Image (cartoon, rainbow, N blue to C red):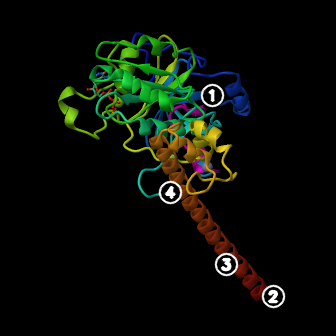
Amino acid sequence: MPRPPDDGVNMVDLETLGWDLECAELFRTHAEQGLLAARVAVAHNYLYQLAAANRELLAEVSGRLRHQGDIAENTPVVGDWVAIKPSQTEQKATIEAVLPRRTSFSRKVAGETTRRQLVAANIDTIFLVCGLDDDFNVRRIERYLVAIRESGAAPVIVLNKADLCADLEQARAATAAVAGDTPTHVVNCLAQDGIDPLKAYLTRGRTIALIGSSGVGKSTIINRLLGVDRQRTRTVRSKDGRGRHTTTQRELIVMPGGGLLIDTPGMRELQLWDSAQALEEAFDDIDVLAASCRFRDCSHGEEPGCAVRAAVDADALARRRYDNYRALKREGANLQARRDELARSEERRLTKTVHRSMRSVRHNRLTDKP
Ligand SMILES: Nc1nc2c(ncn2[C@@H]2O[C@H](COP(=O)(O)OP(=O)(O)OP(=O)(O)O)[C@@H](O)[C@H]2O)c(=O)[nH]1
Ligand SMILES: [Mg+2]
Ligand SMILES: [Zn+2]
C-alpha cells in the first residue's frame, strides 16, 4: 500500500497521487453523482487496494461495471483512477467507473493465446531496468523500447549492477546505439552509485513504473530511492534461482519526497501487442533510411533499390539491429493476422446467432398467426 514509511497517518492529497486538471475534467460527471476519486495501488483478483485523499481502502468492482461495456476498459489495473462509492463500513468501497487511461503499458499474454494484458495505467515515465551482468542484452532493450513507446510513457534506460560489468564503456556504447534520445543512467545499487540522478525524476504527482526482467534490481532500486528496505528483494543465496520472481504483485508506492513508483514482477518474455506505429518510432533511424527505398511499401527484404539494406551493407546500420527490426516486424504482422482471424471468427459467430434468432422470430410470427 502507498504508505510513506515515516508517516503513520498517511496524509496524502489527490495531487500527491498524480491528480490534475485533466483527471478532474474526466471525473466531473462522477463527482456530480457524489462519487469519490481514488487510485489503484494494488489489483488483486477481485479486490483492489486503493489510495484516496488521506486514506487507503479496499474495494470491489460493482456488479454493474463488471457486466457493462468493454472488459479491458472496465477492469482496473494498478495506476488506474477510479470512481468509488464508499460503503457504510468506512474501509470498504465499490468501484463504479474506471477513468479513461492516459497511458497504458500492455503486452501480449505469454504463450500462444492472442490476448492483451494490461500491465499498468497512467504511467508518465518508465524506468527500463537492465542488469549489466551476463544477462545484458541490447536486443531486449530494443524490444522494450518499442513496447514503451506504444504505451505513451516516456522511457528512461537504467543500467544496473555496474559493479558486475567488465567493460562499462562497451556496454554504454552498445546501449547508446539503440537508445536514440532515450536518457540512460548507470547505477550500482551496492555502492549507492548513480541513485541520485534517478531521484530527479521523482517530482510530485509523477508516476514512474519500473519494468524489466526478473532479478535486474527493480525492487532494490526502489529501496535505495526510498532509503529503507521496503520491497522484498532476491536474497543472495537464491541467486541461482533464475526465473523465480521475488516481486509477485504490481504495486504503487507513494514516495515521501514526491512522486510515485510502481514496482512490477520481472517479465520472462515481453511479447509486443500493438506495435506497428511504435516500431517505426523506436527504429526511427531505419524509418529515415526507408524514405530513400525505391518502393514506398518496401519491406527491406529482397526488394531492389532498398536503402535500408544498402546501409547495412555499407556498415552504416548495424546488421543485428536490422535483423531485430525485421524480427519484431514479423512478430507484429503475425500477431495482427491472428487478431484479424479472431475478429473474423467472432463476426461469423455473431452473424450465426443473429440469423438463428431472426429465424426463430420469423417462425414464431408464422405460428402466432390466427
Ligand atoms: N552486484 C549487484 N547486485 C545487485 C545490484 N542491484 C541489485 N542487486 C541484487 O540483485 C538481486 C535481485 O534484485 P531485486 O531487486 O530483487 O530484482 P527485481 O528486478 O526486483 O526482481 P523481481 O522482483 O524478481 O522482478 C538481489 O540479490 C540484489 O541484491 C547491483 O547494483 N549490483
Ligand atoms: Mg522485485
Ligand atoms: Zn527498403
Q: At x 22% / y 32%, what residue is drawn? A: 239
Question: Which mark sits nearer the N-terminus, 2 or 3?
Answer: 3
Element under disc 3: helix
The residue that mark 2 highlights is 369
Q: Residue furthest right?
A: 370
The residue that mark 3 highlights is 356
Question: Which mark sits nearer the N-terminus, 1 or 4?
Answer: 1
The residue that mark 4 highlights is 114
Say if residue 95 shows up in the picture: no
Q: In which quarter of the image is residue 52?
A: top right
- Which of these two is toward me, 257 or 41? 257
Q: Position of residue 166 (x, y in %)?
A: 28, 24
Amino acid at circle 2 = Lys
- Marks 2, 1: nearer the viewer: 1
Element under disc 4: loop
Vertical order, 361 against 6 (above or below): below
Q: Residues within 10 Å of mark 2 (few under 14, many from 20)?
A: few
Q: Position of residue 143 (x, y in %)?
A: 48, 40
Check if residue 359 falls in the magenta segment: no
Amino acid at circle 3 = Arg
